[in-house]
Amino acid sequence: MSIADKARNKAEEMKGAAKEKFGDATDNERMRTEGSAEKTGARTKQAGEHVKDAGRDVRDAFRG
């Protein structure tokens, strides 16, 4: 996974967390839900990237 991908995913996660907190502070359920969804989506992307990296590591280990 490239550094740019990591940064993009982290930025998206932080944006979602900010929206979620803003929704909590203003009692805006829609904003809270939207932020939570963005945060979860970013974490899912990050996990997918980690799985790809692990797969590449296994492939490289077998190639020697």
Image (spheres, rainbow, N blue to C red):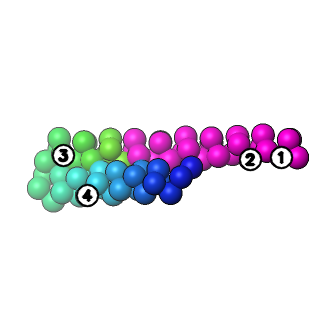
Q: Which label lies toward us, 3 or 1?
A: 1
- Mark closest to the chain's N terminus, 4 or 3: 4
Amino acid at circle 1: Ala
Asked if marks 4 and 1 touch (Cβ < 8 Å), the reply is no
Checking the image for residue 48, the label placed there is: none
Q: Which label lies toward us, 2 or 3?
A: 2
Residue at mark 3 to residue at mark 1: CA–CA distance: 45 Å
What residue is shown with label 3? 31
Q: Element type at marker 1?
A: helix
Crowding near the residue tagged with mark 3, few <14, some 14–19, many ≥20 C-alpha atoms within 10 Å: some
Q: Position of residue 15 (x, y in %)?
A: 28, 54
Q: Element type at marker 3?
A: helix
Q: Which label lies toward us, 4 or 1?
A: 1
Asked if marks 2 and 1 touch (Cβ < 8 Å), the reply is yes
Residue at mark 4 to residue at mark 1: CA–CA distance: 40 Å
What residue is shown with label 1? 61
- Mark closest to the chain's N terminus, 4 or 1: 4
